[in-house]
Structures are given as C-alpha cells and as structure tokens.
Image (cartoon, rainbow, N blue to C red):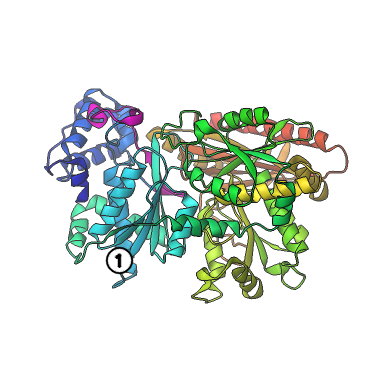
Amino acid sequence: MLYRNIVSAMPTAATLTFSAEAKSKLLPTTQHNLERVYSDPTATDRDRASIDELLVAKAWTELDDRFFRDIAFGTGGMRGRTIGKIITKAEAGQPQSLDRPEFPGTGTNMLNYENVHRAVSALGAYLIEGYPGEKLSVVIAHDTRFFSKEFSLEAAKALNALGIDALLFPEDRSTPQLSFSVRQYNAFAGIMITASHNPPHDNGMKFYSHDGGQVVEPHASGITEKFQQFADDPSALDDLLKTTKIPGKIITFAAKADQIYQDAVADLVLEPDAISATRDKIKFVYTPLHGTGVRSTPALLNRFGFHYSIVESQRKGDSRFPTVKSPNPDNAEALELAIKQAEVEKADIVMATDPDCDRMGVAVRDADGKMVLLTGNQIGSIISYYRCARLTARGVLTEANRKKGIIIKTFVTTDLQKRIAERFGVGCIETLTGFKYIGEKMFDYEKTLNDPDYGKRPAKERRTELLARSHFVIFGGEESYGYSGGDYVRDKDANAAVLMFSEVAAWAKSQGQTLVEYLDAIYRELGFYTERLGTLTFEGAQGAQQIAKLLASFRAHPPERYHGQEVSRVDDFGLQSFHDADGKPIPKETMLLFHLVDGSRMAVRGSGTEPKIKFYFFTRADVSGDLMAIKTQRKAFLDAWWNEVREDVKKRVE
C-alpha cells in the first residue's frame, strides 16, 4: 500500500496483549480495533509505538475515543480528529512549523493517512465498478488545515494506484470551487479535504459525485461498504490493486481554472447599476479567517468595484487559526477583529468566511450606527427576498413561469423563506439538513431537461431553459450560514454569498435603507419569524452513547408540554414517511420535530459532523404594532424554552 511509503516503515505483524485492567477499562469495540490495527501487517512501528505509549499511560479515554469505531460518513462527509488530545512521542516526531506534530494520530476513529487512503481507495473502487472501462478522473482540493495538503497528495496517490487520474490545484482552494470544477472538467468525482469550521485539531473529507454535488444515497452507502470491506479485509484492496494496468496521473490545474470559476460566480449579480451607483457610498470589511476565501472573494469584490478592506492578521492561511477561538463565522467572537476594523474605518458591513469558504457570517450597521450580527436565517432571508424581488422586477419571473421558480431550504431553516416563496408565487422545497440534499434537488431539475450540454451553457440560457421546462432554483440555503444562488455549483458557496450580500447592501443603500431596515421591512410585510439554536456537546465514545441515548429518549418519551403549551404533533423522520413538495420521498434520518399549539416548533437531531446534539427552535408573530417589542417578547419566549429543554435533558441523561 502507498501508505507504507508515506510513513517510511516496513510492513510487519505483531500481537497485542491487554492487561486485566485494560480489558476492564476499554470498550469491547476499542479492544477489537486495537488488536486489528496492531496485528495488521501494514501497520507501522509508529502505529504500535503510539498504542503502546497510550496503554502504558493508562489513557483509557483517549484510546476509546481513538479506537471505539471506524471513522464514519456523516451529513457532510467524514470528519474526525487528526491530532489527538494526547500526542504521543511517536506522533510528535521531528519539530514542524506551526507546532504541528509530524504525523497524524493513530486510530481507527482518527483522520490519518491510513483512513484517508482506505476511504479514497473505497471511492476509487466504487467508481471502477460503476464506470467499467472508462478512463476515470477525480478532482481534489484542500483547505488550510493541518495535514490537508498531505492528505490531498495521499488521496491522489491512492487513486493513481487504481489507474485513476487526480486533478489537483496548485494551492488550497475553496469547497465551492471544488464542486464547480468537478462539472467543469467532466470528472467522475471530487474530494474536498476539509473540516470546514471545526477546531484546529480536526480534519476531514467530503466526496462529490460527477454532478458536483456531495454523494447521496445509494452512493454514500456503496462507498461506505467498500471502506468497511477494506478495513475488515485489507487483502481485498491488494487484490484490486493488482488489476491496475496503467497507473493514473497527477494533473495540476492552470491559473485559468480560477478565472472560469469566478466568471460563473459573477453571473449571479442582478443589479450591476445599483452597485455602480453606490460603490463610493458603502464600505465593507472582509476576513477569510485564515482560510481559502482569500483566493477568490477579493477578486470578485474587485471585479464590481466594491470598496473594502481585508483583516490583514487573518489574511494568511494558518492551520492554528490563531486569532480566533473557532474559525466559525456564525460565532460572534470570530468577527471581533473585523468589527473593530470596521469601527476604525467607519465601514458599513463586515463579512467573514470559514476555512473552506462555504459558509459566510456578517455584521451590519443599523440606523443608529451600531454593528449587529445577523443569523444565518436572516442572511438567507434577505438574499432570497432580494433575488425574488429583482427577478420579478426585471421580468425574469412572470405570471406564466413563476411556478417554475423554487426556493430550497432545510427543515431546520426559517419558515420566513417559505413565506417569501408564497409572497412571490414561487415554490418552496424542504430537505433534510445537509447541503447535499439541496444539490441533489438541483441535479433532479437538470436531469428532467435531458440536455447533455446543459453544464456548458451560459447561466442565463440555463435559467431560461429551467423556467420553461423544469424548475429554476432562485436560492438555496441552510440556517447554518450556507447559501447558493445558482446551480453552477452544487454546494454552498461563501464566495458567492459575499458577492450576493454585497449586492443587496448596495441595492438597499440606493433605496436609502440599511440592511437592518431592509430586513425589518420584510418582517412588517410578511410577519416576524425568529429562531434559536441550542447545542450540547458530548465528545468521544462516551459522548456518542449519550447522544444516542438522548435521541432515543425523546423518541420513546416525547414531551407533552413546553413553556405552558401542549405539544400538538411529533414528526419522527426516522420512523414516519415524508415526501417533499415534488413528491419525492425524504430519506430516513433520526430527527424529531415537536409542534406546539401556537405554531411554534422544536427540532432535535444529532450533528452529522460534530459531537453535538442540536435543538432548533422556531416561532412567529404578526407585526401590527411595535416591532422592537415583538422582537423582545419572542426572544424571551425562545430563551425560556431553551432553558426548559436543558433542564429536561439533564433528567434524560441521568
């Protein structure tokens, strides 16, 4: 295996013996996986040295966390710790830049060379079965995280060993550009090495299908089965490798690849005249939070003449993300430096993108000159309302075709976007959490056209064709700060989100409004919708068990009342059957939706990418009087509800 070359060690076999204490302290699955790794002939001296060191130290929790399972695919792909809570001497190795250990952590539940190699080999094997006789190629991109570049090279070598070409970028690039490039270069799949906004010790990968969207069923299960097969029987991969006649190649993209992607994003602009009229009257501060956004976002802002500055201390890629507690743009703390810079420069708007540039958070100045943070629901609602309004005003959406227009949102995204769809007479599709489901709907609409040249057509031609013969996606969004304004990309795109949001700001400015006033006008027209997200973190093997226990508890013993109101209905997406507005079945997922008699509701689900259980709260009120008073009252309602749920959770985990 190529992994042996990476770690520079000869394959040998060995036997692991557990002490009586180890047997009593470690989970059975942990012991099984430790024995499997330790005795694997492809395991290295470093692997075994790390295991020995942790056993001698009696680091039972660390061992359970690393080995209690094989790393799994979630809603966003595969994510896990790359650097352990305890770094062994064997992993630390020789000193590295940015205080990084020389090697990733050993463990079946760790994102390391072995698991990257096995997962990418599983993808390759699945492609070989699915496209027999084809000359296969896969696009690979990576973000700025620890080991991201090394993992991308390991992925390329794993594919090459199976005869598959790997198309790589010369440096880090964003997730949306990866999605775009899969389609642009007619690749059969894509791999993005990233853990998005997770902590620095994490890394991960997302797999993409030939349409540029993240893999969905049945393909996700097919790849997972291959992954598990290679874990249980390494000889199966060795046998497959023997069938390779011609090794694949590594091909590096030229600089024009960036320009082609940026041209596609630029086509999203609807009112260039409004931008030109206000470019000297509005100023932005942008931060890439040490990530990939700096590769394209400034170029797009420059293209339309926006007046902006960059937070210089956060411009450069840095795997430590040293200036923030978390590189997550939905956290207020991540925008602090940008907001301070905006105060000094008297800028109007702050925008931040996460390390792989698929999420965007913002702060805007209100009528009193105060900087306020907007939620992902508010940002998405502003953009979706604007795009519906301008497409209608420009005659793109008409009485004849508006039913073909679609807003796509997840079940845990604000209902304001559903109300916006009703306001403009367009459709609204709700999906499970995960932008892969939004991308899948885009591909469904493309497939109905049966147009083999669809992906090569200009954006306006695609839009016209969809409005005439299928469905045109006006906007797709998640409450978790992910947005899409076009099907040129099949994942959320923060480069595009910055551009779209900047355009709305320019338009509002041309109408004499701040963005807060623009949003308040939407509330006064359609009603005040507000939401709250509550998260509880349970890390490691024990945490996974607690999350499973909680979800089972809410299913078996649903609450009867919340905040003095009866729970009128419970939707169980794991046991009941649901269909979207197109009549397509919703995949089964462990998510529960509790409806109160006043129309408020709460969704409960486990995160697919983080060790968290999430609670989503939704409420609405008519606006017939003091909007500020209504905002205050509804916020207090959601705060009290969350406090009540937390007390309930304590009882359920006892």
Secondary structure under tag 1 reads helix
Of the pair 432 and 593, the residue shown nearer to us = 432
Q: Is residue 557 left or right of residue 502?
A: left
Tell me which corner region of the image, top left, top right, bottom left or bottom right, holds residue 596.
top right
Asked whether residue 65 is in view, the answer is yes
Q: Is residue 296 left or right of residue 463?
A: left
Where does the image place residue 448, in percent across and percent down from the top left? Answer: 55, 74
Q: Residue at x 52, y 77 (%)?
A: 450
Where does the image place residue 353, in percent across and percent down from the top left? Answer: 54, 41
Q: Is residue 385 left or right of residue 105?
A: right
Where does the image place residue 577, in percent across and percent down from the top left? Answer: 56, 59
Q: Is residue 568 above or below residue 586?
A: above
Three-letter code, disc 1: Ile
- On whether residue 92 falls in the magenta region, the answer is yes
Q: Residue at x 15, y 41 (%)?
A: 9
Q: Residue furthest top?
A: 57
Q: Which residues are magenta?
A: 73-99
Q: Residue at x 31, y 44 (%)?
A: 150
Of the pair 245 and 72, the residue shown nearer to us = 245
Where does the image place residue 501, in percent across and percent down from the top left? Answer: 65, 47
- On whether residue 274 falls in the magenta region, the answer is no
Q: Is residue 588 left or right of residue 624?
A: left
Q: Residue at x 39, y 64 (%)?
A: 187
Asked whether residue 216 is in view, the answer is no
* Circle 1 residue: 128
Q: Is residue 235 above or below residue 400?
A: above
Give neighbour class at mark 1: few <14, some 14-19, many 20+ (Cα, 10 Å): some
